[in-house]
Amino acid sequence: MALIVKKFGGSSMATVQRIGLVADRVAQSTSQGDQVVVVVSAMQGETDRLLKLASQVCTMPRDREIDVLLATGEQVAIALLALALREKGIEARSFLGHQVKILTDNVHGSARIVTIDAAPVHECLQRGEVVVVAGFQGVDQDGNITTLGRGGSDLSAVAMAAAVGADACEIYSDVDGIYTTDPGIYSKARKIDKISCEEMLELASLGAKVLQARSVEFALKHKVAICCKSTFSEGSGSWVLPVISGLEGEAMAGLEGAVVTGVACDRNTARLSVLRIPNRPGTAAALFRPLAEDAINVDVIIQTAPQDGHCELSFTVPKASAERSVQLLLAHQERLGFAEVRVADNVAKVSIVGAGMRSQPGVALQAFEALGQAGIDIQLISTSEIKISVVVDDRLAEAAVRVLHDSFQLDRV
Ligand code: ASP
Ligand code: MG
């Protein structure tokens, strides 16, 4: 008998028929004697629908009332699933965030979980009931409803697993696991059996959409093992594992022993270049300060070596922030003294990720050679211990993914 948290996303809850399938999945587990806590998202499209309604009456993006509105999506979902389970003869009880209770800070729209009171969950489980918890929502210490940010039900599930001491956190969606790259981009993409949290964190932040990045961060910190599975097909799924003591050596080298574990492609990116910046101490800070104050996420920063007292800085921002970034920089142009800002939004960031890179020299060279031989021009490069990202022309991004996937033979175990 195991205690399992199962999370079902919007696509698994899209219709009443699908909610029936979800109930079947839960029934499979309880019939084996498992104790089950289910965390669900709103029915597919519901959160978007609610946001659209809000945008028709106000311009406030993050606020208490928006969270009151958005939290209704998950309330509908938990009630329908609990009813469907009861219909199958399984006792089930639904809980909203404040009933569990999932205590968060008061940052509406992207609240952080502080604690979860697992006692009501354990009481239900002891009575042999299935617990159905609303994902994505919590409550602050003054009793206000909060939400955790888009895709936040993944985080709810991982946090719930940590709080109740679950044996595993299974995250169900319409894909049967984590792939070496997006199978929509490359048919040779292979399902990964196990991947470390830190690699998954890089992949999730770099455009792989299977898991919300914050949930992986939480899993790493609180040592929760996640299994990504499909609601609609049988299969063992993919395990995302925190580094467990005794496993360190293996995790350092990549859980499957490969140097590179996956290739991610982020199309939601734009490149900015700031030309002829007077090269004085403090200019880089002065340049990035207005962007940081506007919460714009800057990535892949490259500065050229100074020449006749000037340098050039290029970096990437999310596409939606490109125009705003240019405005902010131009507003400070006189003080900063640079000549010009150029923006290119026809770029994409392609990255290879793998814990094995740490101990293997020559990985960057191999990647650059493969791209060079394929005639793919690299505009920017950035590296971390377990990641190499290149910014390329958007039209070449998919080719770059395939070239790198082939070069590191990711279709083979
Ligand atoms: N319903 C929320 C959203 O669409 C949370 C989630 O799906 O995880 O973002
Ligand atoms: Mg989701």
Image (cartoon, rainbow, N blue to C red):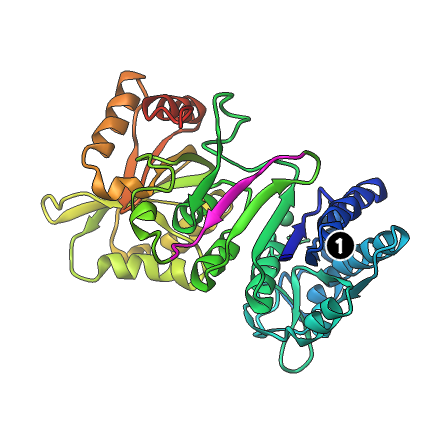
Position of 230 with respect to 126 (left or right) is left
Q: Which region shows up in magenta? A: 234-244
Residue 293, percent across and down?
42, 64
Position of 84 with respect to 348 (left or right) is right
267 is within the stretch colored magenta: no
**Which residue occupies the foreground of this view, 120 or 351?**
120
Ligand 1 within 8 angstroms of badge 1 C-beta? no
| Magenta stretch, main secondary structure class | loop
Q: Residue at x 29, y 40 (%)?
A: 356
Q: How crowded is mark 1: few (under 14 residues within 10 Å), some or many (20 or more)?
A: some
Q: Outermost residue toward the left?
A: 308
Residue 43, percent across and down?
76, 48
Q: Residue tagged by mark 1?
A: 50
Q: Residue at x 35, y 34 (%)?
A: 391
On the question of residue 139 being in view, the answer is: yes
Say which amino acid is labelled 1: Leu
Q: Residue at x 38, y 51 (%)?
A: 298
Q: Find numbered disc 1 in the image and state the secondary structure of the residue it sits on.
A: helix
Q: Is residue 333 above or below residue 383?
A: below
Quarter of the image with the C terminus is top left
**Which residue occupies the foreground of this view, 124 or 52?**
124
**Which residue occupies the foreground of this view, 312 or 317?**
317
Q: In this view, does 124 lie above or below 398?
A: below
On the question of residue 335 being in view, the answer is: no
Residue 67, percent across and down?
69, 65
Position of 210 with respect to 308 (left or right) is right
